[in-house]
């Protein structure tokens, strides 16, 4: 979904938004904070974190990309790289260099023949497919 979002941004705005993954990372940290500090379950936390990450994306577009819309493309390229470094380093300062895990309530393993898959992976795949089909059926006229 992150790759699809990056393609969508490039297709609509014509911007190689290198900070797209960094914004997704901030959404992940928002999910972690919502789970740890507010005590919500994983799915509720994800649903609450999505608008937070979307707001960050909108602010980036309005504050950084929109002012240089008619400038040479190298300007947006430099801004995108700078934003990526800034967002990544802010996360590093706030959350530290250690890997952080969000514990999943879906730890059971599903066996399909000789293939063993954690249930969460199946749920993620199904969710991504539903969102992909929904996005493919949207049209902006």
Image (cartoon, helix red, strand yellow):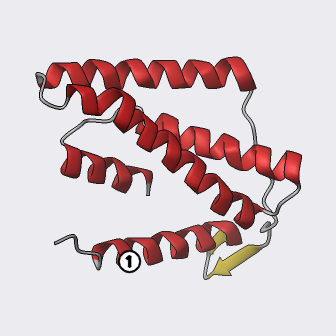
Q: Which residue is drawn at 29% across and 79% down?
A: 137
Q: Is residue 111 left or right of residue 127?
A: right
How busy is the neighbourhood of tag 1: few (under 14 within 10 Å), some, or many (20 plus)?
few
> Where's residue 61, x and y in %?
35, 37
Looking at the rendering, which quadrant does residue 17 occupy?
A: top left
- Asked if residue 104 is positioned above or below residue 115 in the image, the reply reads above
Most foreground residue, 125 or 56: 56
Image quarter of the N terminus: bottom left
Q: In this view, does 112 lie to the left or right of 19?
A: right
Q: Foreground: 107 or 96?
A: 96
Residue nearest the viewer, comparing 85 with 49 = 49
Q: Which residue sits at x=24%, y=24%?
A: 77
Relative to 133, say whether 5 is above or below.
above
Q: In this view, does 104 lie above or below 28?
A: below
Residue at 48%, 69% in the rendered image:
128
Give the labeled residue for mark 1: 134
Query: Does residue 125 appear in the picture of this structure?
Result: yes
- Residue 48 image position (x, y, % from top left): 67, 58
Occupied quadrant, residue 51: bottom right
- Across and down, in percent, residue 28 comes to 64, 45
The secondary element bearing badge 1 is classed as helix
């Amino acid at each position: 979904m992150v790759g699809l979002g990056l393609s969508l941004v490039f297709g609509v705005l014509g911007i190689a938004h290198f900070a797209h993954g960094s914004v997704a990372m901030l959404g992940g940290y928002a999910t972690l904070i919502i789970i740890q500090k507010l005590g919500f379950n994983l799915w509720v936390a994800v649903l609450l974190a999505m608008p937070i990450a979307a707001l960050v994306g909108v602010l980036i577009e309005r504050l950084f990309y929109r002012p240089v819309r008619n400038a040479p493309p190298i300007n947006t390229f430099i801004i995108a790289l700078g934003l990526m470094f800034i967002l990544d380093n802010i996360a590093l300062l706030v959350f530290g260099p250690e890997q952080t895990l969000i514990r999943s309530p879906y730890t059971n393993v599903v066996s399909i023949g000789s293939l063993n898959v954690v249930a969460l992976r199946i749920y993620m795949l199904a969710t991504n497919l539903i969102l992909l089909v929904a996005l493919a059926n949207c049209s902006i006229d």
